[in-house]
Image (cartoon, rainbow, N blue to C red):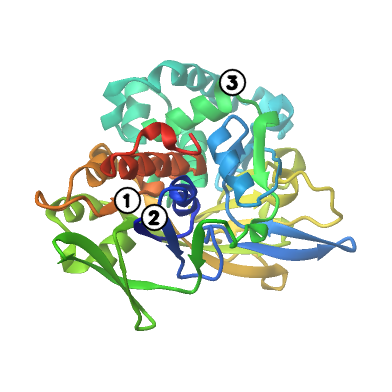
Amino acid sequence: MKKKVAIIGSGLAGMGVAIQLKEHFNITVFEEGEKVVGNSKSFSISCDQKQFTIDTSFNSINNSEEGLLSLLKTLGARVKPADVSFGIQQHRFGLEFCDKGLDGFFSQRKNLVNARHLKLFLEIKRFQSDCLSDANEIKYSNYTLKQYSKDKGYSSELLNNYLIPITSTIWAVPIHKAPDFPALMPIQYLKNYIISGRNSNKNWLTVENWNDLSTQLRGIDIQINKKVRFVKRQVEFGRMIVVLFFEDGSVEKFDTVIFACHANQALRILEDDATNLEYGLLRNFKYEKNTVKLHTDSTVMPENKKAWASFNYRIDDSGKATAIKWVNRFEQMELTKNYFVSVNDAGEVNEDAILKIVEYEHPLFDLKTTKAQNQLEKLNLQPESEEFEKTTFFCGSYFKNGQYEETFRSAVDCAGAVFQSQKYKIAELKIS
């Protein structure tokens, strides 16, 4: 008889580990929301007498990520080409530019003879060159973005008008916390996905419609609107099992539980049943709530359209920052109307132009979390008790850098640990 495995969370981590284990275990996925891969909030929009879907997240996928793409295909997701480009607006200095070639960087033609802007251009080129070697430099694993910038002798212009905006846009980091962000994350991201010859914008993809993802997958029981309140581990008939208690009052027993949710959610569900190891590691991960607006107000974009990019970082006169996705460019849609997604809008979006407002919860990374990340594999390797077989496993975006492909890799590692604990061979994994 196959053992019963409960997976809490139906994001890419949860669905990824479920699909890999389903041939060997009876899998049940519990999702507290209304749809799988709940991290993505997509909405149907009508324009030019057509219906299409807009994803309010900022994530993109590189077409070299075969395992992730295989997972999405299994889930019934269709992918399409996407454009990845970055733009910066500094209202205090009247500065606008983007990274789409010289025409975008010098979208304000006056900057062709502006010494500061020319210096910024040269520093960006230098930084891109430094990335190739610094991405694997152990020394920088203990550096914040600000410390790295100082160590390299970069100007405040590069830090404030390039490194911080891109970091804040990709990871939804508040502008005042970005200087303390772990330096290696943006260095490795920019090396692997923007700079290196392995990838170009032609290789970027996005999911066409997250709402199309299937909830009817052979070998997996997916239960939506089923919130797990807490989990208890107990001995029954001489072996350790896990008991899930649900918000609706129901209770169910499993042989194994996999927490494929946020670290803070896992800790909250475990409550006082958490081991010293689980508590000691999971407590290091904090999350930030971000308000996201889907709208059609183009006044938040640069005055010069040559400076418009897929991802734009706007800093207003008071220093408040907003990350803005230009949906039309990112998804390469030819429409008569422009659509935008603003994260933590400072009140500049016209209320009449707002179509939807949603909230996301993103992990906050700092040097403390990166140190904890280095030990997270222990959660999936060390038994909760020396007397019994391991019952509890973890995966999710907080294991890596928060991006889709790294979240999926955490699911691969988690599945491998489950197989190992059950004496299966890692080669039996369906997706690698």
Q: Can residue 51 be seen?
A: yes
Q: In this view, does 396 lie above or below 196?
A: below
- Please provide percent x and percent y for residue 267: 26, 61
Looking at the rendered structure, the kind of residue marked 2 is Ala
The answer to whether marks 1 and 2 mark residues whose Cβ atoms lie closer than 8 Å is: yes
The quarter holding residue 89 reads top right
Q: Is residue 176 above or below residue 426?
A: below
Which residue is identified by label 1? 394
- Please provide percent x and percent y for residue 52: 78, 59
Q: Which of marks 1 and 3 is in front?
A: 1
Question: Dot 1, how many residues are within 10 Å of its Cα: few (below 14), some (14-19), or many (20+)?
Answer: many
Q: What is the residue that sits farthest to the right in this orientation?
A: 49
The quarter holding residue 93 reads top right
Residue visible at 45% across and 21% down in the picture: 131
- Please provide percent x and percent y for residue 239: 17, 59
Q: Is residue 403 above or below residue 134?
A: below
